[in-house]
Amino acid sequence: MPADAPQPTPQMVAAVDLGSNSFHMIVAQVDDGHMRITDRLKEMVRLGAGLRPDKRLDPEVEDRAIACLERFGQRLRSLPPGAVRAVGTNTLRQIAPESGFVERAETALGHPVDVIAGREEARLIYLGVAHGLAAGTERRLVVDIGGGSTEIIIGMGFAPRLRESLHMGCVSMSQRYFADGKISPRAMEKATLAGALEVRPVRELFRQHRWQTAVGTSGTIRAIAAVIRAEGWCDDGISASALTRLRQTIVARGRVSALDFKGLSDERRPVFAGGVAVLCAVFETLGIEHLQVCDYALREGLIYEMAGRNQLEDVRERTVATLSRQFQIDQAHAQRVRASALDLLRQLAAPWSLQDPAHALMLGWAARLHEIGLLVAHSQYQKHGAYLLRNADLPGFTHREQAVLAALVLGHRRKFPTQEIQSLPKSLRERTECLCLILRLAVLMRRARSTEPKPCPDIETADRALTLHFPAGWLDAHPLNRLELEQEAERLTTAGFSLRFT
């Protein structure tokens, strides 16, 4: 950049982590890809402990969570939309959507809350850890123990190579084996064996990657390291011998209430034994001798992810490109559909309130992936494509984004996907319907798969009524296109749209 060129303005952003044990928020200033944290907030909410068998939250726990998010929201009030990324992890993945908790959480926080998959959580954790440590070429094993899940990742530099999310955490393990407050040798043994069983299916895969250094992060691991250091058992991180000694001491104390270690907070004590059992299982199963501790994790990963998106390094672009190659999509045709869709969007963005850049991104990705189901079967390939996009691990995409993408791909032909769209959160339904209609028209215009230029019709719109004006004589010269438009007009009436063309 020339010396006299204007320098980028530092951006204030925030990340909120709605974990199973605690809620965290960090506010940071991002300047040319570098992060400087200006504020941190944390509250022990114990969301996972309040999840009932019917997958709804205990009212007291739900109220505690909402009150916390209202306090966070006060701090974030000055930040504009797009400058805050809030994600929910293991417990939010389990809460019944019809409970309405996510909607209440968004209202309290004042920003959207994205529920992310376990492997996506693992990717973001690794991104945070990689930025928190000195860059190196060694292969790293990263371990993060949360309240309801444990993520293990192997990566090099800033790139994760292997990611897994295991269904065990400090809260869930404590509830299962130490709920009565007693810590017997048998209970600790059963907890550690249960953890080992969770790791077992991926044990050989992770061992084969021959990682060179192991790094731990999260409140559980930092608390274990603090206790071990205060007891004088290990000055740097967590050694296998020190962890074994801690486990033996916990069992000797016999009760959760007796875990009055230096460096262990009152808030952490009720779930400490469960966290130790999880870490012991990971150490023993993966053969860890020493674990370095890093302060950066999911929240910092979210900040760097936001910085990357602002600098056009969006991992979702790489995901879409990878899917296009893996599923042998006709990329030249997909790009022509994308171009037609974006041409239509430019005319409809203002009247349909689709000016947010996220709408163009989602429409473009749907156009590039609309034929992803063809590799499964041609018959009803839109349904195969929607299933793949709804259920696959798509790095960078949230559950909500995948649901919208799946709805668009399902609805690009044949029946309009009214039911699929109605299953989305209310705030997304109307705009997803509009994007779906635009994609349908773009696919229809490019159905012949010709490389010849296609006219972009001028569009008149009044609410949900569209009139397409083609060049004089074009429809008469293309009777198949006219017939397809007539059929499409009939299909769109079921979705409450009116389509005319001249």
Image (tube, helix red, strand yellow):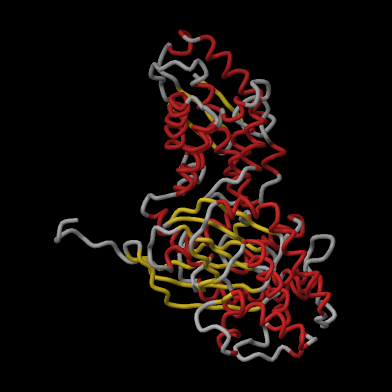
Q: Nearer the viewer, residue 427 or 281?
A: 281
Residue 486 against residue 386 in the figure, above or below: above
Residue at the spot x=60%, y=88% of the render? 263
Q: Position of residue 107 (x, y in %)?
A: 62, 65
Residue at the spot x=64%, y=21% of the render? 378
The N terminus lies in quadrant: bottom left
Question: Is 357 left, or right, of 403 in this rendering?
Answer: left
Q: Position of residue 336 (x, y in %)?
A: 43, 26
Q: Nearer the viewer, residue 245 or 388?
A: 245
Q: Position of residue 276 (x, y in %)?
A: 68, 75
Residue 361 against residue 203 in the figure, above or below: above
Query: In the rendered image, is residue 194 in sight?
Result: yes
Residue 298 against residue 174 in the figure, above or below: above
* Residue 66 picture quarter: bottom right
Q: Nearer the viewer, residue 7 or 227?
A: 227
Question: Is 478 left, or right, of 491 in this rendering?
Answer: left
Q: Position of residue 19 (x, y in %)?
A: 64, 68
Residue 106 against residue 453 in the figure, above or below: below
Query: In the rendered image, is residue 350 in sight?
Result: no
* Residue 90 picture quarter: bottom right
* Residue 500 picture quarter: top right
Q: Nearer the viewer, residue 243 or 294?
A: 243
